[in-house]
Image: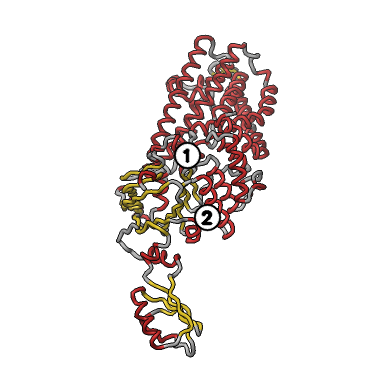
Amino acid sequence: MMGKYGTILRTSISERLIYRTDFFVSTALRFAPIITTILLWRAVFAGAGRAELASYTYHDIVAYYLFSTLGRAFSSMPGLATGITRDVRQGQIQRFLLQPVDYLTYLLMYRVAHKLVYYMVAFVPFVILFSLCRSVLPGWPEPERLIAGLLSLLLAFLLGFHIEASLGLLSFWFLEITGFLYIMMGVNYFFSGHMIPLDLLPSLVRQIADVLPFRYLAYFPAAVFLGKVSGAEMWRGLLTQTLWVGVWVVCSRALLARGLRRYAAYGG
Amino acid sequence: MADQAIITVRDLRRHFRVFQKREGFLGALQGLFRRQYRLVKAVDGVSFDIAEGEIVGFLGPNGAGKTTTLKMLSGLLYPTSGEARVMGFVPWERSNEFRRRFALVMGQRNQLWWDLPAIESFNLQKEIYAIPERDFKRRLDDLTELLGVADLLHQPVRELSLGERMKMELIGAFLHGPRVVLLDEPTIGLDVVAQATILDCLREFNKQNCTTILLTSHYMRDVEKLCDRIIVINHGRIIYDGALEGVIERFGRFKIVRLQFRGTTPPRNAWGVRGEVVDYRPPVVCLRVERDNVPALLHEILDQAELDDISVEDPPLEEVIGEVFTSTTESVVTA
């Protein structure tokens, strides 16, 4: 007896596996920009003629970039918001009004399946990438740091899911949400620390980034793995990350409840 | 009837405000500032009761309010006003108890996982509705046999034909043994054979499980075959509710008079205003005659000509219903 959400998970995995070839190719292609970004940083350091930029050496930057990419592999949600838009617009959402299934939990299970299949495929290129770059990486983290790091990746997944789902649920009010999505993508890319480490930002911008939830999508997990935060500060960070997850869970739940009420009031 | 009714509907109304887009660029620009709306009364004061185990056909032209009514009864839409109870539940409160016991099938909507074999979707249904293994097995076997799709269970849904897919949809809807099933155009776009199979299955399921079925259709065939009772809706109002045969009583303004002459058959144009010739194959002439004029006409013919045979029949139901749809009758009739 797997329970209904377990079965949704299993069914989603078998569905994702149907497109494994396409998935394999696109996953492999997604690794190409990583190489170019590493080369870009090399050029930046060469051009600057300095060994360090705001306490980051070239090696630090590459290591940071690898770990923030790992964070993004957990927190990015390709197609989640647009999928919700499609469900709302084409009326598939009705299924979740008719059947005793919770839409957000369903989407979460579907996303977990999506990610699991992705990791299965992306595992090999990630291992290759990390082993090629092992000279720039710090050594294996001690158990406490490893646990904290894995936890922060898991929380990054949950946070990314609920932020993107909330955005998608705006489709109940707006026919078109691509505008919002573009803005969010930019904000996310910048303030999550995916573009550049947040430490490199001017202090005012840095202060803004620190109070936003996006830093927990890429910067924070990387900071944990790289030993930029430790001990009490590290666990406080995890606690804040958990609180942000809570905030966005509440937000997406409220949007869904209100959205469904509106849907039933205005018709699909 | 009211105390054993499984569905009760009282003065149900649903009005929509529809945004009117003005023509052209300037119109669109104007629309940004001041929007014009039109009020559409999709359902405008509908009342009926349905007893457990009944199969009721919901008839009406496109836009009559059939689907809107079904959507309210399944909890997808709030009404503007009025009441409804389905198995004692207010549908739009959408309690899990309610949702476990009913099903809505929409002919143009897909509930199955497109890329997976139907059986995977069914296994999922089993978990979602917590269907006991034995019931699941029995119903699946019964339904696949009734519909003749047992060998298609393991084929991805996207590879099935429209008819096969609809049959699978139907199985998905019946697996959890709902007490009330609402079907919106279940046979739309299907060939005659697939239609017949689906109708047989519905009747069988109704007989075996006393399932209450309410279906909309604009195919007369569906209704004639399946329903003892029909509700005709037009412009958001019920214009007829009662036995199928009663429709003709109520709305059939014409009779078909079939005459077989002995000797010379009068020419085609001999009938003038007394009746419209719908078939002229001497010695047989078929006339469409207003009901009130039939006795006088028969009297006259019998006086003047010699006949081998004579019969007076009702026109086909389809024709009568068609007339009801096109007439803008405001009178609300309940049988």
The chain carrying label 1 is B
Q: Residue at x 36, y 70 (%)?
A: B253
Can you say whether A42 is above or below B31 in the image? above
Residue A94, compared with residue B58, is above or below; it is above
Residue B77 relative to residue A59: left or right:
left
Residue B29 makes an appearance in the image? no
Question: Whole-percent x and y of residue A204?
Answer: 42, 21
- Which badge, 1 or 2, is on the more N-terminal residue? 1
Give the x, y percent position of residue B23. Answer: 36, 57
Residue in the foreground of this view, choosing between B76 and A177 = B76
* Residue in the foreground of this view, choosing between A91 and B3: B3
Measured Cα–Cα span from mark 1 to mark 2: 23 Å
Q: Where the C terminus of chain A falls, by quadrant? A: top left
Its colouring scheme is secondary structure
* Badge 2 density bin: few <14, some 14–19, many ≥20, Cα 10 Å: many
Residue B188 vs residue A174: left or right? right
Helix, strand or loop for disc 1: loop
Q: Which residue matches tag 2? A: B187
Above or below residue B274? Residue A138 is above
Number of marks drawn: 2
Q: Are marks 1 and 2 in contact (CB under 8 Å)?
A: no
Residue A254 sits in which quadrant? top left
To which quarter of the image does residue B141 belong?
A: top right
Amino acid type, mark 1: Arg
Is label 1 or label 2 in front? Answer: 1
**Would residue B139 be seen by someone viewing this image from the given angle?**
yes
Place of residue B268 in the rendered image (x, y in percent of width and height, measured from the top left): 44, 85
Q: Position of residue A211 (x, y in %)?
A: 43, 21
Which residue was labeled with disc 1? B101
Extreme residue toward the bottom, this view: B264
Q: Chain of mark 2?
A: B
